[in-house]
Image: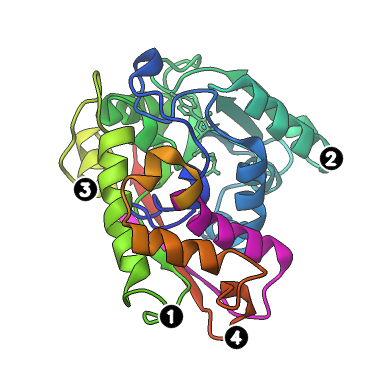
Amino acid sequence: MTTEEHGRQSEEHGHQSIENGRHGHAGDGHGAYDPSMLQRADAFYGGVYQEICDWLSISPGAHALEAGSGAGGFTELLAGAVGNGGTVAALDVTPELLQTARERVQKSLFQDRVTYHEGDIEHLPFDDGHFDLVWSSRTVHHLSDQLAGVKELRRVLKPGGRLALREGGLRSRFLPNDIGIGAPGLEDRLDAAFEAWFHTHVRGGEGVVAYPFGWTQLLRDAGLTNVTARSFMLEVLPPLQTLEVEFMTNLLRRWVESEERRGFIGDEDAESINKLIDPDDSQYAFNRSDLHYMEGVTIYLGTA
Ligand SMILES: C[S@@+](CC[C@H](N)C(=O)[O-])C[C@H]1O[C@@H](n2cnc3c(N)ncnc32)[C@H](O)[C@@H]1O
């Protein structure tokens, strides 16, 4: 989860298969998202999500859309924030995830405020000018045509309504630069490998429309105004909880377990990673007391 374009190098892309161009979308096509991984991310980012939701200052009675609702962690926060009389439409193209989100929200106090919609951001099943807020996290970069997708998200906003995208961000780090095995700078090399992988497997392939500009420009090009950005720092220090260890382990493990990713790193780095994630190895990362996870989670905001 976390860096990626920043935020992009988040666990989000941990276990996905590559299906470039499937259904006309960028790689990591529909059906490739692992619900348990997204649930783990919801738990890992829970505190930051609450900060973001508070920062959005959602008016009581607001009508919100979450586009690409995933495992439903943010859906539940939105449902609390819109208050009585407010509504949240959770939309996702993956039926299994919509069900995961539904099961989560149904356990909350706010279940009556949420409706579920299987659908595609590029063809939203809503009238023009319907929502006060559209929230979309780590989803737009999966669209084959990001600009067309953001225009469609804008279409369903009321005049004065706001679009908030979680994209980009500052890449996550949690290891010291020199871990004493292999060459220093492992995470820098993984960042470079991530970019190469991402531009080959997610934003490469047939049908993917290049958009060589930043997220603020994307919002402006889609017709939004008052475009701004805010980043929320997530820092985690030992002692780590089991969930945090699992999350960070997966950030490393995917480079050695995913065949498609393995080709983007060298043998020495693969060997280091295998030691770092093996609890029986003397170099096991999570016996170290000098880990420091940090990531900047960025939200881009614009007004219709
Ligand atoms: C990486 S996950 C992010 C989930 C959640 N928003 C989060 O931040 O954890 C991307 C989500 O977008 C959904 N998705 C991908 N393409 C979509 C599209 N064209 N329309 C609607 N949902 C889409 C996926 O099914 C998945 O739930």
Q: Position of residue 154 (x, y in %)?
A: 36, 30
Mark 1: which amino acid? Ile
The disc at residue 168 is: none
Task: Please tell me how crowded label 1 is: few (under 14), some (14-19), or many (20+) other residues with Cα within 10 Å.
Answer: some
Q: Which residues are magenta?
A: 227-255
In the picture shown, does residue 82 fall above or below 3?
above
The numbered mark, 1 or 4, whose residue comes first in the sequence reads: 1
Q: In the rendered structure, are the residues bearing label 2 and label 4 in contact, judged by CB atoms less than 8 Å apart? A: no
Mark 4: which amino acid? Ser
Towards the viewer: 141 or 155: 141
In the rendered image, which residue does mark 1 sit on? Answer: 179
In the rendered image, which residue does mark 3 sit on? Answer: 214
Question: Disc 1 and disc 4: Cα gap in Å?
Answer: 12 Å
- Look at 58% across and 47% down and name the residue there: 59
In the rendered image, which residue does mark 2 sit on? Answer: 107
Q: In the rendered structure, are the residues bearing label 3 and label 2 in contact, judged by CB atoms less than 8 Å apart? A: no
The numbered mark, 2 or 1, whose residue comes first in the sequence reads: 2
Towards the viewer: 131 or 125: 125
Query: In this view, which residue lies farthest toward the left?
Result: 212
Q: In terms of secondary structure, where does tag 1 sit?
A: loop
Question: Disc 2 and disc 1: Cα gap in Å?
Answer: 43 Å
- Look at 53% across and 68% down and name the residue there: 276
Name the side, left or right, on which 220 lies relative to 242.
left
The numbered mark, 3 or 4, whose residue comes first in the sequence reads: 3
The numbered mark, 3 or 2, whose residue comes first in the sequence reads: 2
The numbered mark, 2 or 4, whose residue comes first in the sequence reads: 2
Judged by depth in the image, the label closer to the viewer, 1 or 3, is 1
